[in-house]
Amino acid sequence: MNSEELAALDRRYVWHPFTQQQGWTAEDAPIIADAHGCTLRDTEGNVYIDGVSSLWCNVHGHRHPRIDQAIRDQLDKVAHSTMLGLSHEPAIRLAEKLVNLAPSGLTRVFYSDSGSTAAEIAIKIAYQHFQQSGQPKRTRFISLKDAYHGDTIGAVSVGGIDLFHSTYKPLLFDTLQAESGDIESMERLLTAYGQQVAAVIMEPIVQGAAGMLIHPNGYLRAVRQLCDEHGVLLICDEVATGFGRTGTMFACQQEGVSPDLMCVAKGITGGYLPLAATFATERLYESFLGAHDEFKTFFHGHTYTGNPLACAAALASLEVFDHEFTLDEVADRCIQFGELLKPLETMDGVAEVRRRGMMVGIELEGFPVAARSGHQVTLAARRRGAIVRPLGDVVVLMPPLSISEVELGQLVSIVVEAIAEVVESVPRQEIRISRTKVTV
Ligand SMILES: *Cc1c(COP(=O)(O)O)cnc(C)c1O
C-alpha cells in the first residue's frame, strides 16, 4: 500500500491519542515504516532523529540486535501465557533482576502493562493495605500540582494538569494537592490531614508531563522524611524517569530514597513492548497475606500482565545496560547535552531550558496559546529531520540514551533552527508573564 492510500485509511478509520482529529486530517503526519538505532524512516523514505524516544520509552535505539534476538527466541517458546495461576521463566527472572536494581527495600514486583495501570495498582495496594492493617481511616492521597500519572480514572484522580484532567472531575475521587517542589506545602497538608492519608504519590525529581519541572535538591528526601513522621506511604512514579533517564537507573537513587511503592513502565522493555511493574516493600506484601476467607487477596490483574515476550525484551534491555555500560556512556552524553543547550538559554523566544539527565524541556515564551508555538516547532523540526513532541509551549527533548554524540548535536541544531523559524514567523504578544520571568 502506498503512502497516500495509507494516509487516507488513517483519516478514515483511526482516532489518535491526545490528538485534535479535526486538525490531524489537514496535516500530513509521517507514517513510520521502519527504524534503525535512533533514526525513524517514513513510507516516503524521509529519515528523522527520534528526539523523544518514541514517546519517552526507547532506551538503546530501535532494532537493537540483542533485544530483537531475545524476542525472537521467546517467540519460539511461547508468546503469551497467563500469570493468573501460572508462572513463566521470563517473568520470574526479570522480577529477580528488577529487585536487585531497585532502591533497597523494594522486594516484590507486581506486573501490569502500562504506566497508568502501574499507578492504579500502587494506589489500590496503598489503600487496601491500610484497610486490612487496622487503620481504615487512612483513605486519602496527596498528589502534586501539575502531576501526571496516566489517563485511567484513578491515575487521573491523582493527576494535576487541568487541561488533561479537569473535564473528568465529577468522575474522580477527591485528593489533597500539594504545591510541587514546595516542602512547606506538603508539611501543612500532612500536619492537617496526616491521619487520613494513605500515601503521597509523586514523580521523583522531574515532573515530566508538567513540562519537565525539576524539583529543588533535597525535596524528595524531605518528602520521604515527612511521610515517615506521619505514618504515610510514599509512592514514586518512575514511569518517565526510570531506566537511566535522569542519569541513574532510577531517579529516587539520586537522593538515596527508597519509596514504599514504585511504578515503572515506559523504558522497562527498552521501548519495545508494553510492560509495567509496581514494586512493593515486604511489609506491604505481607499485609496481604492471610487465609483465603480473610479476603486479603489483591484482587487485581490484567490479561496481559507479565507477558513473556515483553519480559524477555526487558531482560535483554537490562543486559544491554551491562554490556554497553549504558549508564557510564550516558553520563558523557548528559554533559554534552548541557553544553549544547547553553546557547538556547539566551535565545529569543525561549523562557527557560530545564534539564535533568536526558530529560529536557525548552519553555517558549511570548506566543499566544492559539499560535500553538510548541506544535509549530514540532512541524519545523520535522521538516529538518527530527521528531519531537511538545507539551504546550514546552519543547521536549528526550532522545534514546544510546544517541551518538553526532546525532545529539544534529538534534539540538535542528531544534534551534526550528525555534528560530517559529520566532521569526509567528507574531508574539507584547507582554506575557511566563512561569519563570517577565518579559516586556
Ligand atoms: C507516561 C506516564 C504515565 C502513564 O504511562 P502509560 O504507559 O502511558 O499509561 C504515568 N506516569 C508518568 C510519570 C508518565 O510519564
Image: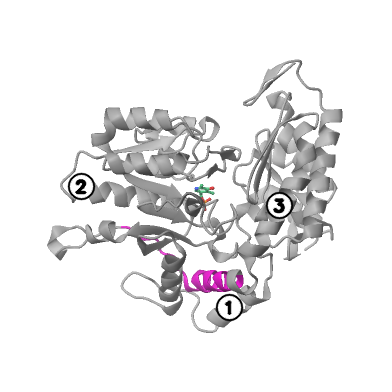
How packed mark 3 is, by other alpha carbons closer than 10 Å (few <14, some 14-19, many 20 or more), is few
Identified by mark 1, the residue type is: Ala
User: On residue 131, which mark appears?
Assistant: 2
Q: Which residues are magenta?
A: 300-320
Q: Residue 248: x, y in percent? A: 56, 57
Query: Which quadrant does the C terminus fall into?
Result: top right
| Residue at 73 percent of width and 23 percent of height | 366
Per the image, label 3 sits on a secondary structure element best described as helix
Residue at the disc numbered 3: 335
The first of marks 3 and 1 along the sequence is 1
Residue 343, can we see it?
yes
Q: Is residue 64 covered in magenta?
A: no
Identified by mark 3, the residue type is: Ile
Q: Residue 146: x, y in percent? A: 51, 34
The quarter holding residue 20 reads top right
Residue at the disc numbered 1: 70
The residues bearing labels 2 and 3 have C-alpha atoms spaced at a distance of 47 Å
Per the image, label 1 sits on a secondary structure element best described as helix
